[in-house]
Amino acid sequence: MKDRLNVLFAAFEAVPFMKTGGLGDVAGSLPPALKKAGCDVRVIIPKFLDMPEEYKSKLRHVTQFYVPLGWRNQYCGIEQLEHNGVTFYFVDNESYFARHGAYGYFDDGERIAFFSKAIVECIQYLPDFECDILHCNDWHTALAPVFLREFYSGMPLYDNIKTVFTVHNLKFQGQFTDLILGDILGLSHIAPAAQQLRCDRTSINYMQGALCYSDILSTVSPTYAGEIQNSYYGEHMERIFQRRNNILFGILNGIDTDVYNPQNDMDIASRYSVDNIEGKKECKRAIQEELGLEQNPDIPLIIMIGRLTEQKGMNLVREVFDEMMRESLQLAILGTGDREYEDMLRYYENIYRGKLAVKIMFDEKLSHRMYSGADMILMPSRFEPCGLSQMIAMAYGTLPIVRESGGLKDSVKPYNMYTGEGTGFSFANYNAHEMLFTIKNAVYVYYNKKDDWKKLQQTAMNEDFSWKQAAEKYVDMYLRLHPEAAGIRKSETEPEDGVYDGKNGETEQEKKTPVTKKNVEKKKAAPRKKAESSKTSKTKAARTTKSVKTAKAGETKVETEKAAEGAPAENKAENELQKPEPVKEPAKAAKSAKTRETKVETEKVSESAAVNKEAVKETKKAENVSEEAANTDKAVKTEKNAKTTKSGQVKTDTEKEVKKPVTEKKSEPAKVLDAKAEKKSNNKKG
């Protein structure tokens, strides 16, 4: 069993090196959590021009090679950096990546194809790393599973690799003309690949290739994993998800709870915690002043942070904007997006000055100040694979108002007006006035139900959105592909030291006991609730022998009594085998209660298994041992059992036999046995 699982985590962006959206947050914070969960994780991303200089200066060159891409052979360098305990690899090719930004260039199809091919090619050049799992993320790495199967299959180093593909946003799939199928990808002559990449007569779809070729598919919330299997959310990929739903998993993303923590956030006006939330008032006053809003601690402040697009519900906001601003509230918006929504917000900012603040930009530190100072965050997304803003807001005690979609539904518990429970407010339908009604309801609770509001804040701040839980689920997913690596984590049934686990009857101290023949015999002789009825008589005889040996060690209670209870009475042939041979007893059996008990115990041992010569010898030895052990405390119980036996009750071999008095007339075979025993006793006296 392997005690290490090697994971190569491929993404096109990762904080703090490059970030354009939620993928960057995930690629920067999930790998450290996976490493803590027991995996050796390495992250591979492109080396971008906009990478901060403080990290560029620390890069170390690892290797270089040429990547075959269609008819081309392109240079590829691999550089390395350790960050947060994780090794990051950077793919270096200046003609493709020495540009500002990550996307939006005319040759994105070729740039992305090169990156995917470089991921697979570099595996054979990485020192001290033999990949078990190639975890690809979104369409920028979607061709890697295709290349792996079609060009590297059959090579020993690559045949062990299993692939996982995670969909972060199904909206963006990477569709290009099919002319690049042969010219760049070199796959036009491979019919299965060409067929599974093609999405129409003249186009290919990079993501579709990964959905067809990967060993496991996942997405970033359980609800979204179900939604993408229907046509409304499926983006024309629903049939693939339906066909492969047995290997489709939804795992809710987490957030970096060290970065997004009001207790130690140095970017906010006043630090606070769930136990002392007074500092949030100062944060609210400070952000109202900074954004030019009326400095009123009593008016609720609602924020929106993120992309200004239809996906994020901006068309709903536009439909009821005037009605919303008539309410007694303030609204602050931070982000960039579609031009029509940016212009709309600039227009309304001039009309509702003092109540509305708009920042058409993105500023990470400003977002922290807005999270800490706001009362609510509005996220009316048409679809939301996971969403991080609602989790971050809850960490700061800012309650989310969301549409029940994807990760928003999985992470926000709607307010219950009767019990006061919940972590935010939600609405089900993608409808502008349903959104407006939910906003009004949240504002009403803020003004009129102060105790409920405080309870909602405390519950939201106590929610655990750390990466630990998600990382454990990812490891479970990896182990489905490499079950031999289960040694990377402790057994789920393994208790703490000295603590009974309730399942196998062992403590951690017992598990640490050296494995010797004596200890194994003791373990096997322990009482069992029910013996297996399918064991053969030979196995039962072996158990009997072991039980007698245990009695030698000083255990006065004969363990074979338990084993005898489980013997199958209905099997006549087996019962015949279990009939004991005559056992010679001492002449003083009738006079001594202790000796009589020995006789009874010996008969039980004999009846519980198929007797052979070896069992008889062991039984004789047990008679002598029983007398030596009679002085122990446990022998008191044995004498009581002997008295009970003397009074007329003999316990029989099976549960189905009727208990008979000892004085009952003996069968002919029994008389013969007694006669032989008496005769031998008299000979000894003579």
Image: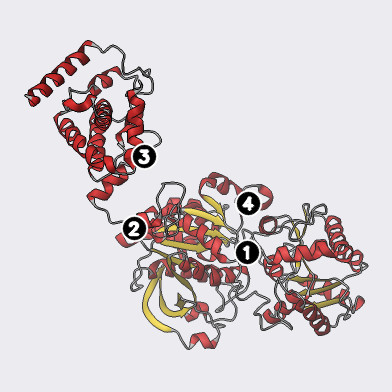
Residue 666 spot, x, y in % from top left: 26, 13
Q: Which structural element holds mark 2?
A: loop
Please indicate, yes or no, whether residue 47 appears anywhere in the rendered image.
yes
Determine crowd level at label 1: few under 14, some 14-19, many 20+ residues with C-alpha closer than 10 A: some
* Residue wearing tag 3: 527
Residue 532 is situated, as x and y percent measured from the top left of the image, at 35, 32
Residue denoted by label 2: 512
Question: Label 3: how many residues lie within 10 Å, few (<14), some (14-19) or many (20+)?
Answer: few
299 or 170, which lies in front?
299
Q: Are marks 3 and 1 in contact (CB under 8 Å)?
A: no
Q: Quadrant of the C terminus?
A: top left
Task: Name the one closer to the observer, 13 or 25.
Answer: 25
Nearer to us of marks 1 and 4 is 1
- How many numbered marks appear? 4
Q: Which residue is mark 4?
A: 228
The kind of secondary structure element at disc 1 is loop
Residue at (33% x, 27% y) in the render: 567
SS label for mark 3:
loop
Front in this rendered view, residue 598 or 583: 598
Q: How far apart in space, not on screen, are marks 1 and 4 (Cα)?
A: 26 Å
Residue 654: quarter of image: top left
Which callout, 4 or 2, points at the residue further toward the start of the chain?
4
**Between discs 3 and 2, the one toward the N terminus:** 2
In this rendering, would 608 be left or right of 245?
left
- Does residue 205 show up? no
Q: Residues within 10 Å of mark 4 (few under 14, many from 20)?
A: many
Q: CA distance from mark 3 to mark 1?
A: 43 Å
- Residue type at mark 1 is Asp
The amino acid on which the numbered mark 3 sits, given as a three-letter code, is Pro
528 relative to 177, above or below:
above
The residue at 67%/79% (across/down) is: 364
